[in-house]
C-alpha cells in the first residue's frame, strides 16, 4: 500500500476514535445544568460587583437556587424589580431594596484645601497616597485622581475641582467605588430622603484640621449636642451621621462652625 495513503488512513482512524471518545465522555461526564440558577442569572444585571456578598451574579444565582441564600433583595444594582423577578422564580415573597447611592465625604476642593507638594507621578489615588499621603495637607482627603471613577461601571462619577463627585441618579450602589477609594471616603446614603452628611473624614485635632482645610470637621461636638435623635456621633475627632436615625432636621448643619455638615437629599429633582 502507498505509504502516504496508509498515513492518511491511520491519522483519520485515530481522529475518528478520539472524536467518538470525546463525544462519549461529554455525555458521561457532563455537569447537569441548573436551570433555576440560569433563570435567576438572567434576571440579574450582570455587574458582578459583589455587593450582594457573593463572588458575582453567577455566585448569587447559584446560592439562591441551592437554598444557600434566602434573601432575594441583595442585588443593589437590580433594585426591587430584580428582587421581585427572582422571588417569582423561587416562589417566595419578594423583599424590597432600599434605594441608596454612593457619596464622597470630602469637600476639599482646591479653594478649601491646601497643597503640600506637587505630585507628578502615576495618576492614581492609590499611588499618590503612597507619597506622604498625597499632595494635599489633609492626608484624609480626596486626591481626585479618579480611582473611583475608573472603577464605576455606570459612569456615575466625575472629578470636580479636585474632588470626586457621584451622580446619585446614575449610581447603582454597587460599592465598587467604595472598594477603590484608598482614603475610605465613600459611603452609601439613602436616596430621596433628607439627611445630614459630614463631608469630612479628617481625624486630626481641630487646630491641625483648620490649618489643612477651611471646611474640615474639627470635632467640636456641637453637632452631637444639638441632635435630638442621637444620629450624630463624634469619634476620633470626626463627626459621623447614622443615616438610620437621621431625620434631616438640619440642626447639626446650623450648629457646625466650619460648614463641614451639609443638608442633602440625594436624587431629589432640583427646581
Image (cartoon, grey):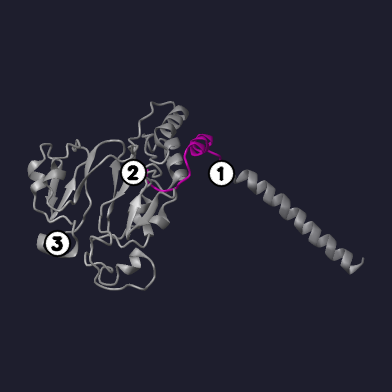
Q: Which residue is mark 3?
A: 210
Magenta residues span 31-52
Mark closer to the observer (1, 3): 3
Tell me whether circle 1 and circle 3 mark residues in contact (CB < 8 Å): no
**At numbered mark 1, what does the secondary structure look like: helix, strand or loop?**
loop
Instruction: Tell me whether the residue at label 2 lies in contact with that at label 1, contact meaning CB atoms closer than 8 angstroms.
Output: no
Q: Residues within 10 Å of mark 2 (few under 14, many from 20)?
A: many
Of label 2 and label 3, which has the lower sequence position?
Answer: 2
Q: CA distance from mark 2 to mark 3?
A: 29 Å
Q: Which residue is mark 1?
A: 31
Whole-percent x and y of residue 174? 38, 46
In this view, the mark in front (2 or 1)? 2
Dots 2, 3 in contact, CB < 8 A: no
> Looking at the rendering, which quadrant does residue 11 occupy?
bottom right
Residue at coordinates 77% horizontally, 54% vertically from top-left?
A: 16
Q: Give the mark nearest the N terminus, 1 or 3.
A: 1
| Residue appearing at x 41%, y 44% in the figure | 170
Is residue 43 highlighted in magenta?
Answer: yes
| Residue tagged 2 | 101
Circle 3 residues within 10 Å: few <14, some 14–19, many ≥20: some
* As drawn, 118 above or below 216: below
For the residue pair 27 and 81, the one nearer the viewer reads as 81
Taking depth in this image into account, of 48 and 184 the one nearest to the observer is 184
Of callouts 2 and 1, which one flags the residue occurring earlier in the amino acid sequence? 1
Amino acid at each position: 500500500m502507498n505509504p502516504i495513503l496508509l498515513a492518511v488512513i491511520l491519522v483519520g482512524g485515530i481522529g475518528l476514535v478520539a472524536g467518538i471518545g470525546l463525544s462519549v465522555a461529554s455525555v458521561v461526564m457532563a455537569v447537569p445544568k441548573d436551570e433555576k440558577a440560569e433563570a435567576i442569572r438572567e434576571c440579574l444585571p450582570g455587574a458582578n460587583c459583589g455587593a450582594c456578598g457573593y463572588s458575582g451574579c453567577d455566585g448569587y444565582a447559584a446560592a439562591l437556587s441551592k437554598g444557600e441564600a434566602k434573601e432575594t433583595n441583595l442585588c443593589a444594582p437590580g433594585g426591587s424589580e430584580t428582587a421581585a423577578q427572582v422571588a417569582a422564580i423561587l416562589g417566595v415573597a419578594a423583599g424590597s431594596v432600599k434605594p441608596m447611592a454612593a457619596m464622597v465625604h470630602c469637600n476639599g476642593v482646591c479653594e478649601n484645601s491646601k497643597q503640600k507638594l506637587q505630585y507628578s507621578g502615576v495618576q492614581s489615588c492609590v499611588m499618590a497616597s503612597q507619597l506622604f499621603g498625597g499632595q494635599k495637607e489633609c492626608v484624609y482627603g480626596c486626591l481626585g485622581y479618579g480611582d473611583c471613577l475608573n472603577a464605576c461601571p455606570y459612569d456615575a462619577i466625575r472629578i470636580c475641582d479636585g474632588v470626586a463627585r457621584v451622580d446619585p441618579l446614575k449610581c447603582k450602589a454597587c460599592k465598587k467605588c467604595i472598594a477603590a477609594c484608598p482614603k475610605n471616603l465613600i459611603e452609601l446614603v439613602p436616596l430621596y430622603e433628607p439627611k445630614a452628611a459630614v463631608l469630612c473624614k479628617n481625624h486630626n485635632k481641630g487646630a491641625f484640621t483648620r490649618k489643612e482645610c477651611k471646611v474640615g470637621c474639627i470635632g467640636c461636638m456641637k453637632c452631637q449636642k444639638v441632635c435630638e435623635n442621637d444620629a450624630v456621633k463624634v469619634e476620633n475627632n470626626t463627626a459621623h451621621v447614622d443615616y438610620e436615625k437621621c431625620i434631616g432636621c438640619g440642626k447639626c448643619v446650623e450648629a457646625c462652625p466650619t460648614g463641614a455638615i451639609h443638608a442633602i437629599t440625594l436624587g431629589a429633582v432640583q427646581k
